Amino acid sequence: MNQDIFDRLVQIAGKDNVLVNESMKKHTTFRIGGPADFFVTPCSALQTGRLICECRQMGIPYYVMGNGSNLLVSDNGYRGVIIQIYDKLNEIEWQEDGAVVMAGCLLSRFGNEAAKKGLTGFEFATGIPGTMGGAVAMNAGAYGGEIADCIVRARMMDVDGAIRWYEKDELELGYRMSAAIKHNLIVLEAEIKLAKGNTEEIKKKLADLSAARKSKQPLEYPSAGSTFKRPEGYFAGKLIQDAGFKGFSHGGAMVSDKHSGFVINVKDATAEDVMAVINAVSDGVYEKFGVRLEMEVKRLGDF
């Protein structure tokens, strides 16, 4: 451990919020990944900005993550500082027709609390296993809806620590894309606008969508959600299935036999196992259909 780096991180975030050689298996929904040199959980936007500026000043690589629901970490881990914006930055400030939501708030929590308040328009995202920050950055979507449908603006930080509100037309929201990704911005909070609805009807819709997910997606296994982006004019899962890769496995990783768009961790899979499956599927689909699948899951570390 580099004591100087540790001391400087502790000075900003506090000793209880800085972990050394922390296994990333604990912090990704894939349950895969080697140790990060340093794992820091800031308690405010100010701390987040100071941590980023400190890492840049020291010349140390850093990566900002949410709850790790769309992330595959190398078996060798990460040489640098992981900054996690999650449950210490998850407050919701409710408004009459929506809320300002901190980036670390889980979509499931926000969606269910909105339902209790009789607010509709977020049902599509309530079952997505991610945080508001990640959802804004990826313009997350499901069941015909996406974040672009309900966001008003987002408060984001640039690499120099400067923070400002970005209005919706500045967010550059597209398919799994936004200004946050294009310009390396960190989402701190988002203002979401919803509509008044009937609480019981909203809850029923949530229950129906939850049942649909359970029946169609391999939620019983660790994964990072949909592994591939949707190719224009196609569905990734159907291409994979039609190419004969449903149930294909390598080591502990497998293409789900429930939904071919998911690569799952069936038995202590490594990142190497997952990439072997992904590469085989990508090459096989390309050879059969001439369509090159692009990963939706982000990779972190050396591969």
Image (tube, rainbow, N blue to C red):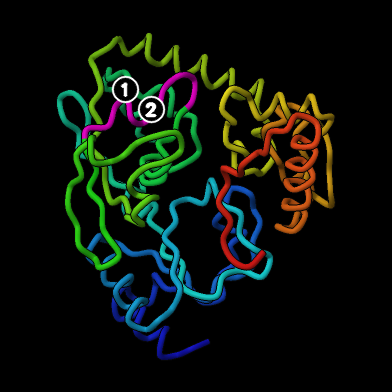
Horizontal and vertical percent position of residue 74: 64, 63
Q: Is residue 200 left or right of residue 47?
A: right
Tell me which residue sits at (68%, 33%) in the image.
291
Classify mark 1: helix, strand or loop.
helix
Amino acid under label 1? Lys
* Residue 190, magenta (yes or no): no
Horizontal and vertical percent position of residue 158: 27, 60
Tell me which residue sits at (80%, 36%) in the image.
287
Determine crowd level at label 1: few under 14, some 14-19, many 20+ residues with C-alpha closer than 10 A: some
Horizontal and vertical percent position of residue 217: 65, 28
Q: Do we see residue 188 in this rendering? A: yes
Q: CA distance from mark 2 to mark 1?
A: 6 Å
Q: Which residue is mark 1?
A: 116
**Which of these two is toward me, 77 or 31?**
77
**Which of these two is toward me, 178 or 300?**
178
Q: From the viewer's perspective, is residue 114 above or below residue 55?
A: above
The residue furthest front is 290
Tell me which residue sits at (34%, 54%) in the image.
183
Which region shows up in magenta?
142-152
Determine crowd level at label 2: few under 14, some 14-19, many 20+ residues with C-alpha closer than 10 A: some
Evaluate if marks 2 and 1 touch, with contact meaning CB atoms under 8 Å apart. yes
Amino acid under label 2? Asn
Quadrant of the rendered image containing residue 22: bottom right
Q: Which residue is mark 2?
A: 112
Q: From the viewer's perspective, is residue 63 above or below residue 104?
A: below
